[in-house]
Amino acid sequence: MAAFNVNAARAQRLEALGLTWDFEVDGETFSLPTEIPRRSAHALAELKDNDLDGLLALLMGEESYQRLCQHEVSVQDIAAILEAYGQDTGLGVGEG
């Protein structure tokens, strides 16, 4: 039996999903990664369950996060974004 090829599996996932998952707020497009590096996963695990700002800043990067903060985005908006992101990418983030 051949060994599981991680690089091939990753390439398939990225081909299917793309490098980023995009969402739009007030006509401006923002991106979240479709794959989370292990280093980022460790940082995510250290966040409190209700730290939506920390979660988004970590996933989006500080510059994109600051652009998002210029918009009137509610907690419900963020929850909807994270739910759709999880459904589309299979990543469960922001779950308490």
Image (tube, grey):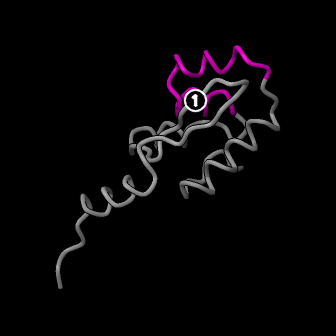
Q: Which residues are magenta?
A: 52-72
Percent from the top left, x then y, of residue 87?
A: 63, 57
Q: Nearer the viewer, residue 21 or 52?
A: 21
Residue 57 in which image quadrant? top right
Locate residue 53, reporting x and y percent: 67, 27
**For the view shown, which residue lies furthest in the bottom direction?**
1
User: Which residue does the image show at 39% across and 43% down from the upper left?
Assistant: 37
Q: Is residue 31 above or below residue 21?
A: above
- The image shows a total of numbered marks equal to 1
Q: Residue furthest left?
A: 2
Q: Quadrant of the N terminus?
A: bottom left
Q: Is residue 57 left or right of residue 74?
A: left
Q: Tell me which residue sits at (39%, 45%) in the image.
A: 38
Horizontally, residue 44 falls left or right of residue 84, namely left
Taking the image as shown, residue 78 lies to the left or right of residue 9, namely right
> Can you identify the residue that label 1 sits on?
30
Decide which of 5, 19 is in the foreground and name it: 19
**The one of 19 and 28 positioned closer to us in this rendering:** 28
Residue 86 % position (x, y): 61, 53
Give the residue type at disc 1. Phe
Q: Identify which residue is drawn at 56% across, 38% down.
A: 22
Query: Magenta span has 55?
Result: yes
Image height of 72 relative to 76, above or below: above
